[in-house]
Image: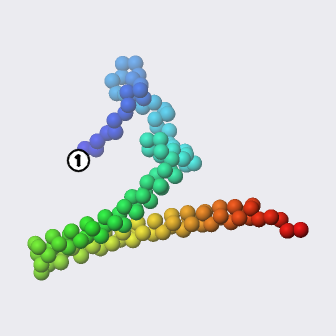
Amino acid sequence: MARRRRAIPAQQREVAGGDETPKVAESYNRPASRFSTKCMHGQTKGNMNMFRTLRAVKFLVTGPVILAVLVVINLMTTPGDWWVKWAALGIGIAWTFSLVRVIRTMVLLGGLLALIAYLKNKKEEPERP
């Protein structure tokens, strides 16, 4: 099976004199910096984590709904064979990871809000002589 080659934008191709095979510009081959915060399409890692958390919250609702639909389909088609247990296992594992992600975010936000409230109360307290 032949491997597909990645398409190279026309701006980054350089054709050497008479050579018909395009050569990739040097900036295209340079590996991304380890400390770069830019992801694909110009999004930062913080934005990507935020969208992942929002998708995790959404999955906490849709996962059990999908599983309930699969149980109904299993009952209607093959009542003696519980093939839905494998789908339940996979969805359950994914649901657990989503729950951990959401709880981690809630703990982080709760701690941040508690710190802000503490600093605000400390600033508003009159100093004692």
**Can residue 90 be spotted in the picture?**
no
- Identity of the residue drawn at 12% across and 81% down: 80
Amino acid type at image mark 1: Met
Find residue 53 and report its image quarter. bottom left
- Identity of the residue drawn at 51% across and 64% down: 105
Q: Is residue 116 left or right of residue 125?
A: left
Display colour scheme: rainbow
129, 51: nearer the viewer: 129
Residue at the far left: name it: 77
Residue at the far top: name it: 17
Classify 63 as above or below 35.
Answer: below
Image x and y of residue 97, in percent: 41, 68
Image x and y of residue 67, in percent: 25, 70
Residue at the disc numbered 1:
1
Classify 19 as above or below 89.
Answer: above
44, 107: nearer the viewer: 107
Classify 13 as above or below 2.
Answer: above
**Can residue 15 be spotted in the picture?**
yes
Numbered disc 1: secondary structure: loop
Q: Is residue 112 left or right of residue 90?
A: right
